[in-house]
């Protein structure tokens, strides 16, 4: 049973709260440095594109945001599944925290895509499969947030949102493969799992930097949201009361 | 794993599997409607409605773009590498509209086989490279780099 110990400890909000306290400044520093590095590299030093000129540079925001919007959905759904199976409080806390972050990232990728689409395609918005399925993803995230707010009972809200999160997972492969399965206005993927990227290395490295930066930034924001939600849910427990008293004493 | 938890796990797998099947069947049934545009093969074969607003897409055939000297009227051919059809459009084309690049047109197909577009969108490809690299690649190729190499609109 001892190899399951970490799993049970992870289930303790108090353990999680104190464990992650030291991680926050590190994650903030690393993601901050990488974000600045990737942004300056991508916007100032990477060469312009042979067709799009400088307008392609929005890729350094659009692609990482869309990546994390999709991966963040799996984080939320897996947390929901763990919560459902093991009735683990912490998993539901993570699930709830992942929703607004994912919604923000999805919104960011939709907005940057529209801004890029106007000069490139000649339209802000087209109801093609990629863009529409991404809009559905935004509504799924917003739906989870609405479900969390709609129930009086914490338990009912968590179970209902976990169910919606799990059903919504079907949308993720659809978004990912939409550009291959159907005729869309959106171009196929530039970064692929199975073959070489179709972007020149001088433009690729800042993009990979930004993607890594977004990963770490996502972890940071998820931990911060989770810690805030732990305090909200555990407000009546002795350790939180003690913690608040301790903080109040500080000048 | 505890039997109760195993049961919950199966319940979750059941939900995910059957919701995927349901959505998959729906997407399969609606596949023609999910496509943003008709490919050239369907336009030429007459498998699309006439005189109704539809979208068509394809690759702008190199050398086929002709502009009227007096007006903004432009005509060009959209191709899938095998068949092509003529598009008539009056208006300003998007910046990235070019020969050898894909485009999506919104308009009506008339009985004369011409497509009368009210909107032309440039469909960008997934390649990104600096101008110098593009020039080098154009120099080593036989000058046919504007040739719609990867046309995948055949059905």
Image (cartoon, helix red, strand yellow):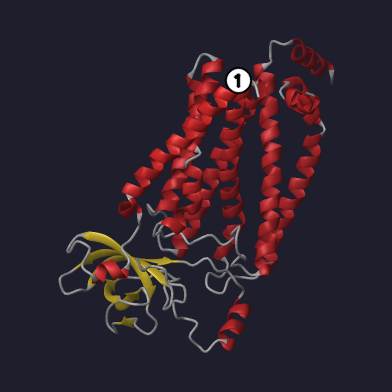
What residue would you read off at disc 1?
B3
Image coords of residue A94 (percent x, y): 64, 29
Q: Is residue A36 above or below residue B138?
A: above
Quarter in which the C terminus of chain B is drawn: bottom left
Label 1 crowd bin: few (<14), some (14–19), many (20+), radius 10 Å: few
- Residue that appears at 44% across and 39% down: B20
Q: Position of residue B19 (x, y in %)?
A: 43, 36
Give whichever of B51, B90 is nearer the camera.
Answer: B51
The answer to whether one can see residue A39 in this image is no
In screen coordinates, is A12 left or right of A68?
A: right
- Report which quarter residue A89 is drawn in: top right
Q: Position of residue A124 (x, y in %)?
A: 42, 55
In the image, is B29 to the left or to the right of A96? left
* Position in image of residue B152 (x %, y %): 42, 68
Q: How many marks?
A: 1
Q: Which chain's residue wears label 1?
A: B
x 56%, y 74%: residue: A50
On-image quarter of the N terminus of chain B: top right
């Amino acid at each position: 049973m001892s190899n399951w110990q970490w799993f049970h400890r992870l289930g303790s909000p108090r353990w999680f709260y104190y464990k992650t306290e030291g991680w926050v400044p590190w994650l903030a520093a690393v993601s901050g440095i990488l974000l600045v590095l990737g942004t300056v590299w991508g916007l100032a030093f990477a060469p312009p594109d042979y067709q799009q000129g400088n307008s392609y540079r929005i890729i350094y925001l659009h692609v990482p945001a869309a990546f994390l919007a999709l991966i963040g959905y799996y984080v939320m759904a897996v947390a929901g599944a763990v919560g459902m199976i093991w009735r683990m409080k912490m998993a539901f806390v993570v699930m709830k925290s992942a929703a607004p972050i994912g919604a923000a990232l999805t919104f960011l990728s939709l907005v940057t895509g529209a801004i890029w689409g106007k000069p490139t395609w000649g339209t802000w918005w087209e109801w093609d499969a990629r863009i529409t399925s991404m809009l559905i993803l935004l509504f799924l995230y917003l739906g989870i947030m609405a479900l969390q707010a709609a129930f009086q009972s914490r338990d009912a809200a968590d179970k209902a949102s976990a169910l919606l999160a799990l059903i919504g997972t079907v949308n993720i492969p659809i978004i990912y493969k939409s550009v291959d399965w159907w005729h869309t206005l959106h171009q196929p993927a530039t970064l692929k799992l199975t073959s070489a990227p179709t972007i020149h290395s001088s433009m690729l490295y800042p993009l990979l930097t930004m993607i890594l930066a977004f990963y770490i930034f996502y972890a940071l924001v998820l931990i911060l949201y989770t810690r805030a939600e732990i305090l909200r849910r555990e407000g009546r427990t002795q350790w939180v009361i003690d913690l608040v008293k301790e903080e109040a004493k500080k000048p | 794993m505890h039997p109760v938890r195993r049961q919950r796990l199966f319940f979750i797998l059941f939900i995910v599997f059957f919701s995927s099947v349901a959505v998959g069947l729906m997407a399969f049934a609606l596949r023609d409607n999910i496509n943003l545009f008709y490919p050239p093969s369907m336009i030429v074969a007459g498998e699309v409605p006439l005189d109704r607003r539809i979208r068509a897409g394809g690759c702008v055939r190199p050398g086929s773009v002709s502009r009227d000297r007096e007006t903004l009227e432009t005509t060009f051919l959209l191709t899938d590498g095998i068949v092509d059809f003529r598009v008539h459009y009056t208006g300003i084309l998007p910046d990235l509209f070019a020969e050898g690049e894909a485009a999506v047109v919104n308009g009506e197909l008339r009985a004369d086989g011409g497509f009368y577009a009210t909107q032309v969108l440039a469909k960008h490809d997934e390649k990104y490279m600096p101008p110098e690299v593009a020039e080098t690649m154009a120099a080593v190729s036989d000058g046919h780099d504007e040739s719609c190499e990867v046309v995948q609109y055949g059905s």
